[in-house]
Image (cartoon, helix red, strand yellow):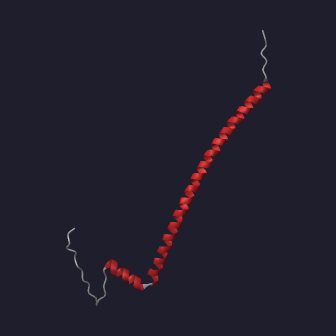
Amino acid sequence: MPRFRVNWPRIISSVSIAIFVAVSVWAAVFFLEMHRELSALRTQEAANQKRLAEIQARLAVRQAYLERLQRDPALVEDIIRKKLGYVRAEEFVFRFEDNRTP
């Protein structure tokens, strides 16, 4: 009966190459996924930075308005007159109803 001879160095090198290729493919897929995730996070960060800048601008406007309310009695009086309908004792208020039908 002929004896079958096993070429161990060739089998070991073939298995090593297969393992190397499998690890390389896994690493490539892993790094591509991480790159996509990083890109998405950078896009989200840019959107958040833009939103933060808009909110900070609105905050600055509101803080300036609050300071005016605290320091400008004429502004406070004007707001009270317009929104609450207050008048001074010597003033008269005339209110006209709009009788037009839509």
Question: Is residue 62 placed above or below 74 in the rendered structure?
Answer: above
Residue 35's x, y, as percent?
62, 49
Question: Is residue 9 placed above or below 5 in the rendered structure?
Answer: below
Instruction: Give left or right: position of 102 versus 47.
Output: left
Q: Quadrant of the N terminus?
A: top right
Q: Nearer the viewer, residue 80 or 14?
A: 14
Question: Is residue 32 placed above or below 5 in the rendered structure?
Answer: below
Instruction: Give left or right: position of 2 versus 100.
Output: right
Q: Nearer the viewer, residue 12 or 70?
A: 12
User: What is the number of callouts on the image?
Assistant: 0
Residue 87's x, y, as percent?
30, 85
Residue plotted at (52% across, 69% down): 56
Residue plotted at (42% across, 85% down): 73
State which quadrant residue 9 falls in.
top right
Residue 80's x, y, as percent?
35, 80
Residue plotted at (56% across, 56% down): 43
Question: Is residue 37 placed above or below 46 in the rendered structure?
Answer: above
View extreme (top): residue: 1
Q: Nearer the viewer, residue 102 or 68?
A: 102
Instruction: Give left or right: position of 55 versus 20.
Output: left
Q: Nearer the viewer, residue 101 or 8?
A: 101
Q: Quadrant of the C terminus?
A: bottom left
Residue 95's x, y, as percent?
24, 80
Residue plotted at (22% across, 75% down): 98
View extreme (bottom): residue: 90
Instruction: Give left or right: position of 1 versus 38.
Output: right
